[in-house]
Each structure stands twice: as C-alpha cells, then as structure tokens.
Image (cartoon, helix red, strand yellow):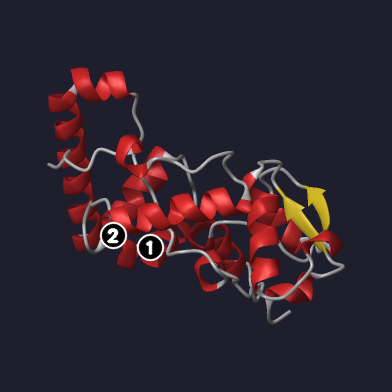
Amino acid sequence: MTRPRDLEGRRVGVSGLPSDPAFVAAILRHDGGDPRTVREVTIGFNAVGALLAGRVAAVPAFWNAEGVALSRHGLRVREFRIDDYGAPRFPEVILMTARRTLERRRPQLLAALAAIEDGRRDAVAHPAAAARVVADAAHARDTGLVRAQLDAVSDAFAPGLRLDRAILERWADFDARIGIVDRRTDVGRAFDFTLRR
C-alpha cells in the first residue's frame, strides 16, 4: 500500500474508540477513497500484534509508539499521518483539568507546568537518562524501545510547552467536520491561554 485509498476492500483494525473509524474515513475520503469499502475489525489496543500477525492491513495508531515498535520488530510500515490527509497538524498532548480546579488550584497547576517543563528540558538534554526513568516508571524491560520512542518525539519536545490557538481552532473545525464531536468545541472556553509557567 502506498496511499490511504489502497485500503479499500481491506481489513483495518480499530480499537473500539469512536475516533478510529472517523480518522480512517477522513483520510480515505481526502485521498479519493470510499471508506464504506473498508472492513473494520475490532482489535482493542493490540495494533502491533494484529499487524505483525497479518490479521489486518492497517490500524489507526500512534506513529511514535506503535509505529516505532513495529519498525523495531522489522515490519516495514507506511505511515499515513492524518495531517498529510486533510487534518491540521496534530496538537500532540494537552493537559486537562476541571474548570473548578483551574479556578481554585491555579498555583498548584502552575507548579505542575513548571515541573513538566523541567522534565521536558532534562529529557531533551539527557535522552538516555530520560529513557531509563520512563522505562522504570512503566516497568518496561525494553529501554531501547523507550529511547526510540523518545527520539521519535524529540522535535515535538524541542519548542517547549505552549498552546497554539490557531492549531486548536483548526482541530475544532476538523473534529466537528469528521464527526468526532457532535458540535464544534469553543476553543476560547475550553482552553486557558493565560496559564503560563
């Protein structure tokens, strides 16, 4: 397969989350394919095993986790990243809290952001040590896999913590358009752009 529409008529593994079929349909439509021809198979969160066993031709997955793991298993993968097929650049990880917590515990949230930023800076400066810490915390035996995953996201770590409102606005449009949410998210209400460390 060289492009998303090559998935027509093929088996695609989905986790069971409603976002998976929406993303598959979005990239197929953007590439001129018909998502109704895809045979979805629920595989839970066993994307690596399902692909290695040949049970499915593709899965929606994280390129920096399952993609890295598959490559380390020797499976040549072709990544169809959603932002190459009609979506804006993905905002990666965002932190969530209740509005009440935001209002009542702002100093603690600022301290948490400062600690996360310190950890980000340390991970960029000392990736091997960061991989060991993450592997220990996750009780993972394969520190090499953790290091490869950290290396995969190093560019995303580089600029530091920040919310990009323009990207979040484009994602709100995209999520509503492909049906992940019933109505468009009010980005100004959902995110606090003033909370800075």
Task: Residue at 57%, 71% (x, y): give it.
Answer: 85
Q: Position of residue 182 (x, y in %)?
A: 59, 38
Q: Position of residue 170 (x, y in %)?
A: 42, 58
Label 1: few (<14), some or many (≥20) within 10 Å?
A: some
SS class of the residue under badge 2?
helix
- Say left or right for 143 vs 9: left
Label placed on residue 157: 2
* The residue positioned farthest toward the bottom in the image shown: 2
Q: Report the quarter where the N terminus lies.
A: bottom right
Whether residue 97 sits left or right of residue 79 in the image: it is left
| The label number, if any, that marks residue 60 in the structure image | none
| Image mark for residue 153 | 1
Q: What's the amino acid at mark 2?
A: Phe
Q: Is residue 34 visible?
A: yes
Q: Quadrant of residue 31?
A: bottom right
**Could you tell me residue 155's position as x and y percent?**
31, 67
Identified at 22% across, 43% down, the residue is 193
Quadrant position of residue 57? bottom right
Residue 63: image location, x then y, percent: 53, 63
